[in-house]
Amino acid sequence: MWPTGCAEPRLWWAVCCLECDVPTDALVLAPVILACVLVLSAVGKLRSPSASAEAFRDLRVPAPLSGRLVIEALPYVELVLAAGLVAVGGRVGSLVAVAALLLFAAYLLLVTRALGFADDVHCACFGAFAPGRITARTVLRNAWLVVVAVAAIAASLNGDSVATRLADAQTPWWWLVGSLAAAATVLLVVRPSGAEETSARQPYASSTEEGEYVRARTPALPVVLGDGSTATLRTLSAERPQLLVHVSETCGSCVDVIGAVPGWREDLPVVDVRLVVQTTPGSSALSSSTEPLSIHDPEGLLGETFDMQATPSAVLLGADGMLAGGPVVGSYAVPDFVEQVKRELAELQSL
């Protein structure tokens, strides 16, 4: 028996399926999904503004789009877009959906381009919620969000906003509840626990519940120095503390840190401030054949040992054969760390 209005079977696909609500209901999920992603992204950026600023530099965002005003305004723009995707309909709603598509397309372009950089780039697209190195999976994720944004534009052509459709019972509310439940389940299953993340990021540095820094022994890791000689980290720090600053010539976030190193050496005369680079001696402008010699780690063993693959990063080795601070990662975290070392040394000298 054919549904009402479809007495002619041959007209079933031509007419009656156009009146079916299921495809339209499914499209309503697209703006809701995008809104949730935008809110998560905005809150993550607001929680860690320094990480967002570093991401802009590491992704080499063009100068007109990487100013402080743009960086600070971006999470609020994402929140406005999220609200518009759900609450606004008609032409304005379509414009909001198009704006969201352009934003996610820009994100996709940036992460795709970053895969071609010489150094790994760590993405802070979601701030503190989802830090990590940009990989093909990151590109796939952003490409999928672009597809969802296109679906959101299609949903906006219906005329009514998501909120209106739910209020008028045009769309079953259980569609949205079920979808959000599925998303929450995937997040809980796939995302590692906080303890696992902390353990993975800081194999050498840890803290007690009271915040006390737990020191570990400096590893006897062999490294090559700027003059071609070899040594171990433990022997280097046997007489003087060693502040190791891991940088790269091609890292935009390292520019200020590299420029600050001479000043740090003057301010910390009792500490050897050494640049660590993943090149062989003499093959980099950052190589130094005079004291303090640069450290060369072409295999990335030092970075893996201290989880300092990202640049810039730093760690302080004490003269007693124990770690004295760090590791820390980021163009804001490294200078802050050095300032902390200065203060602590000044307090010790004043005793």
Image (cartoon, helix red, strand yellow):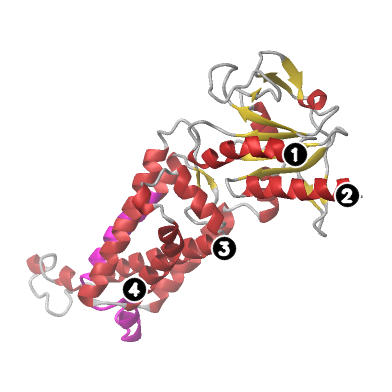
Circle 3: residue type: Arg
Furthest residue to the bottom? Answer: 168
User: Where is residue 324 drawn, in percent x and y?
Assistant: 80, 41
Residue corresponding to mark 3: 47
Q: Residues within 10 Å of mark 1 (few under 14, many from 20)?
A: some
N-terminal label among 4 and 3: 3
Q: Is residue 109 left or right of residue 123?
A: left
Q: Which circle marks residue 84 in the picture?
A: 4
**Residue 270, located in which quarter of the rendered image?**
top right
Q: Are marks 1 and 4 in contact (CB under 8 Å)?
A: no
User: Where is residue 80 drawn, in percent x and y?
Assistant: 38, 71
Residue corresponding to mark 1: 268
Q: Is residue 216 left or right of residue 315?
A: right
Q: Give the structural element (helix, strand or loop) at label 3.
A: helix
Q: What span is colored magenta in the figure?
A: 142-171
The residue shown at (70%, 53%) is: 195
Residue corresponding to mark 2: 350
